[in-house]
Amino acid sequence: MGDRAVVLVKLAAEVLSVERGHPVRVAVDGCSAAGKTTLADELAEVLRGRTAREVIRVGLDYFKRAPKLRTTYPIESPESYYHEVYDNEAIRARLLEPLGPGGDRRYTTAIRQANAADALDVPVRTAAPNAVLIADGAFLQRPELNNCWDLRIYVHVSFETVLQRGAVRDAAWMDSQEAAAHRYRTRYIPGERLYVDHHNPAARADLVVDNEHPTAPVLTRRQTNR
């Protein structure tokens, strides 16, 4: 079993050790291009192989606010990215609170396309009482959301790695790798620095995965909030 597989098994064991009287809500938090989505997808698959419990997989990039509603800051600014892109009210009301204490377990997995251009009509589902939610996204430990998680996993990479990986990845939908790098330097990384500087998510998370080397990630436990 490789290093990554070992870490995934350990993460799955941590998730399954959390006991709640409602579905367990797991945050996979981190900066752009840290590897959150891949890790969350793999973790969900490992969990499905280790438990008969329902595993719900949600990407919070599908809970963005429409661009026309982002009016407080210039839309390409770091401040708009940090404060205005994600619809935290919808994340709470339509996903996290229904799965939490006293919730009716009726949840939605998306409200808009990942580019936020178009609204989605996604059916409401009902989670099993002992379901596990694996949700990945940016800024998940900010105050609007932090108390809605039962386990917080932070995927850490340096901002240099964010720039390198992000520019390569996003060149596919931008004009060029250089254009993607410019957006990371002027919008994404400064916005994510606001989050890191204000909330120190790596220090507050229950578990931290250092993902600088994806084939050999390093898992550490920072604290327990159970």
Image (tube, rainbow, N blue to C red):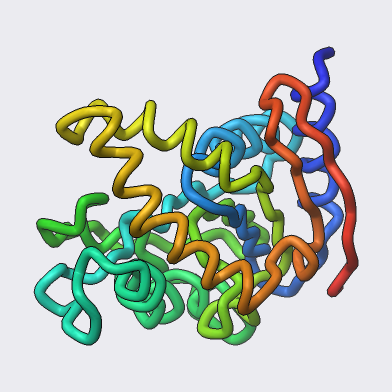
Q: Extreme top residue here?
A: 1
Compared with 159, 4 (above or below) is above
What is the tally of numbered marks visible in this picture? 0
Q: Is residue 226 left or right of residue 98?
A: right
* Percent of width and height locating residue 14: 84, 50
The quadrant in which the N terminus is found is top right
Foreground residue among 179 and 71: 179
Drawn side of residue 167 relative to residue 138, left or right:
left
Q: Would residue 167 appear left or right of 178 to someone viewing this image?
A: right
In the image, is residue 32 above or below residue 63?
above
Classify 83 as above or below 173: below
Residue 200 quadrant: bottom right
Instruction: Return the residue nearer the eye: 224 or 58.
Output: 224
| Front residue of this view, candidates 118 and 19 | 118
Picture quarter containing residue 210? top right
Residue 157 position (above or below residue 71): above
Residue at position x 67%, y 60% from top?
Answer: 130
Residue 68 position within the rendered picture, expressed as x and y whole percent measured from the top left: 10, 74
The residue under the point 76% across, 64% down is 205
Identify the residue shown where x is 40% and y is 71%: 82
Q: Quadrant of the C terminus?
A: bottom right
**Which residue appears at 57% of the width and 59% of the height?**
128
Which quarter of the picture shows residue 49? top right
Where does residue 91 sit, x and y in percent of width and height? 41, 72
